[in-house]
Amino acid sequence: MKVIIADDYEIMSREAAKVVAAEIEKNPDCVLALPTGGTPLGFYAELVRMHKEEGLDFSRVTTFNLDEYLGLPETHKSSYAFYMYDNFFNDVNVNRDRVHIPRGLAEDPHEEAAAYEREIKKAGGIDLAVLGIGRNGHIGFNEPKTEFGSLTRPIYLAKRTIEANARFFDDDPDAVPRQAISMGIKTIMNSRKIILLANGPEKSGAIYQTIHGPVTDMVPSSVLQLHPDCTVFLDRDAASELKPPSDDVVQGPGIMSMVY
Ligand code: GLP
């Protein structure tokens, strides 16, 4: 896996945004999978800046969000739909017809998930998936013990995830929905390119296991070791438990790049 360690969160966010910009420049019709959470806020802010100041054009881009809570309307301020419009879509020229987020109020979540999977296929598959990571190594909402062959489906959140995400629900774990719809591990792994972002000391353990640990369903992100084109973007805190790389380290302004 390729690993980029940035001196700080801003540089990490900028470097990750550059990968998206390069993808759009290469293929203006590209299909992106997009994350939510605290980690990608700087990344979205940088994409908005690139759109406003450098004309980065999202008009032909198709997006699929990784996940959405079940039971929340998109107008709920803690829904991922609200997050996406508030932090990104409202500030760029994305075509709303090309935006896909599972509907938290879908009457039949299983059918919603199956339809989502069909839409991804219809769009030609995902060119670039951007991921965050949970403290237990979850990607999307694929919690430990998720099958590597899983597709988009309704899931139950792990207790640790409910506690971690309570900060987006006025610190009230009881307000966090117990279920969500998430792209599956297989859906994510079928993406042609993957980048994962992580910052802060609370992610260092999950990052160690993602990169150095065995590939195991107990740490869903460890499956990324099997992907042919995956780059992990970290700040120094998230990278603090990594072993020194055996290959050459390439230094750039504010970043170190290495391959494990
Ligand atoms: C949530 C999301 C994930 C996200 C993770 C980390 O549960 N479903 O897609 O990557 O948590 O979030 P944060 O960046 O806020 O730590």
Image: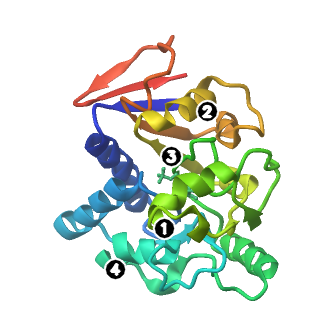
Structural distance between the alpha carbons of marks 1 and 4: 22 Å
Quadrant for the C terminus in the image:
top right
Disc 3 residue type (three-letter):
Ile
Question: Disc 3 vs disc 1: Cβ atoms closer than 8 Å?
Answer: no
Disc 4 residue type (three-letter):
Asn
Q: In the rendered image of this protein, does residue 19 appear above or below residue 170?
A: above
Structural distance between the alpha carbons of marks 2 and 1: 28 Å
Of marks 3 and 1, the one in the foreground: 1
Of marks 1 and 4, the one in the foreground: 1
Residue 244 % position (x, y)? 47, 13
Q: Circle 1 is placed at which residue position?
A: 169
Q: Circle 4 is placed at which residue position?
A: 90
Residue count near mark 4 (Cα–Cα under 10 Å), binned few <14, some 14–19, many ≥20:
few
Numbered circle sitting on residue 195: 3
Residue count near mark 3 (Cα–Cα under 10 Å), binned few <14, some 14–19, many ≥20:
many
Of marks 2 and 1, the one in the foreground: 1
Relative depth, front residue between 173 and 77: 173
Q: In the rendered image of this protein, does residue 5 appear above or below residue 101?
A: above
Residue 101 % position (x, y)? 57, 76
Q: Circle 2 is placed at which residue position?
A: 210
Q: Upstream in the sequence, badge 2 or badge 1?
A: 1
Residue count near mark 1 (Cα–Cα under 10 Å), binned few <14, some 14–19, many ≥20:
some
Quadrant for the N terminus in the image:
top right
Q: Upstream in the sequence, badge 3 or badge 4?
A: 4
